[in-house]
Image: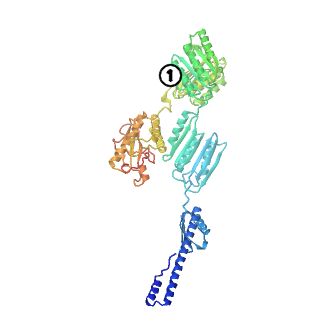
Amino acid sequence: MKLPDLRPILSTVAARIAVRPTPGVLAAVAFAAAGIVMLGVAFLATLAIERRTETAVTTALQTAAAGWASVSVDGLRVTLTGSAPNEAERFRAVNVAGSVVDSGRIIDALDAVPAKAVGAPRFSVEMLRNNDSVQLIGLLPQDPGDDGISKDALLAEVAKFAPDTGVSNMLETAAYPPPPGWNAALTFGISALHLLPSAKISVDAERVAVIAITDSEEQKRSVEAELRKGKPQDIALEMNVSAPRPVIAPFTLRFVIDNQGARFDACSADTDVARRRILAAGGVAGAPADTPCAIGLGVPTPRWSEAVEAVISAVVSLGGGSVTISDADITLEAPQGVSQTTLDRVVGELEQGLPAVFSLAASLGVPTSEGQGPAEFLATLSDAGAVEIGGRLVDELQREAVMAYAKAAFGSDKVKMAARLDPGMPNGWPVRVMAGLQALDQLTAGNLVVRPDSVTVRGVTGSPQARSQIAQILSRQLGQGQSFQVDVRYDAALDPDAAPPPAEDCAARITDILARNKIAFAPGSAEIAGPATPTIAAIADVLDGCPVMLMEIGGHTDAQGSEGGNLALSQARADAVLLALQGRRVDVSGMRAVGYGETRPIADNGTDAGREANRRIEFTLLGSKGAAAGQGDAAPDGQGVNRPSLAPTEPTIRPKPRPDQG
């Protein structure tokens, strides 16, 4: 409240006193002075009331978490100013003030922050598949567009994977347009679900995450290659594919010493420790140190490796022969020329050293030459996959069964039957023939000879597990004490998994790694930061299994600092990445490091985000090292090439900006 201007009154009173200081004048002066005093007292009282009112209303607002409102008091008027978070908060602040003073005294000068428009929701789908059931959970666009997948179309497509149980539908839709990348990501997610019978696949517009279980390491590698090959270019792929230990049935091991040397035809172990013990025992006997030995479930006893060591020692004591363990049944066959006395001694020692769960059948070797007589069954598998069957079968029923199996296994137009019927064949002949055909089916080319006392499978294969699988088939089908021979050679040229993947697939894997984890440096330094070590290791692992590629490692900076300093820093960082890969024994003969400094920005250097994006390391695929010269796969040193980058769209270097250096 303001004090009235009393100067005109005082001037008038003073003039009268100067002119005529009569009693009337003195009375007037006294009256004026009293009025001035009263006005001062009223002003001070009003000011105190205003301050008390302002304090009371402000305290009430702050207690009610409405401190964003300011209070001013002028006499009886209480004015509220400020910006409320929303209309509801503005109204609540007025009510709080009205609880302290009369609401008629309140002047509402508040404003409210305009409500933001509701943004589009995050579209995502989780697809869970296990055995024959599928569950779908998530939010889809109500109208995915002409090239998109609607909710009904998704349900119809996924229902093909679970024809018996159907699909558990927990999908919702929202009337918003699909974000960029959504339709491509969902299509890829469906193809991944088709590929994996046991998986959880999470899809959004920017990434597809796959968690899956496969039956074997070979299937795991195949699945991962298929996923990388089919991944859309702008979608990040996260994979967690595992291959649990398989169930090996029967749990089989076969060890042989013959004129070709010592070897494992089949090797199984229940633990890493057991595998090391088994391979060590085979190594002492002369078997190759790099023999594959599967670790799986189904071992008949935890003392499996102890039994294997004992039977290998027995074969060595006999000077050769073979031993087959199928679950708890052991078949020991001594080589020709070993006396019965020697066999009895070795068997006696072996029986004392075997765990109680095992049973042992031992026999002296018998001739396996082609001159043993006509009681045999023959099958030959050519390189082209054609099968010619000869020898003897028991009757017409067996011939029809053999023909049906052969057509199913090798192709109906690739089987030639030339076997004759002989009802005088020994007991168990049909079982031996069918077991031999199943074994032959594991080969790329080879032959089968079945006789009353032996089954021999010879040939070549493109599967490193084929010899072990043949031994399992024959030991299971023929039974304990039956003799068989496996002479199978692995040829890596026939193995589709042994060939190195195409350079493009390797490049795609590096892209996935960099999309998830960046290569970072200490600020203003060419020293690779510690958190980037796993990224370098992951890239090195990929390159170890790939052909030597022509690749460029490009270093880039932002525009801060001098052009010459940035060029030198980018070159040093590219060199550091190349040296880090070389230090991990990667063949870098096809790689080069090039620093581009600030000359190739991918974002605006006028913003923090743009400068960070420009500070990066890029991998660029130039081609395979074995590509023909003159194809434009390389550019002059230091000049770079205009080819698709393997770097993610986000920066691969994330140092803090320095004012003097990019």
Q: Along the line of sight, which residue is nearer the eye, 240 or 80?
A: 80
Which x, y percent locates residue 337?
56, 10
- Between residue 364 and residue 74, name the one nearer to us: 74
Give the image location of residue 466, x and y in percent: 55, 27
Amino acid type at image mark 1:
Pro
- Secondary structure beneath dot 1 equals loop
Residue pictured at 67% horizontal, 43% vertical: 165
Q: Which quarter of the figure has residue 127?
A: top right
**Residue 633 visible in image:** no
Specify the color scheme: rainbow
In depth, the one of 440 and 77 nearer the eye is 77
Q: Residue 266 appears in which quarter of the rendering?
A: top right
- Residue 547, given in percent of the width and then of the height, sits at 43, 35
Dot 1 surroundings within 10 Å: few (below 14), some, or many (20 or more)? Answer: some
Q: Position of residue 488 (x, y in %)?
A: 53, 23
Residue beneath disc 1: 288
Residue furthest to the left: 564
**Is residue 159 depicted above or below 476 in this figure?**
below
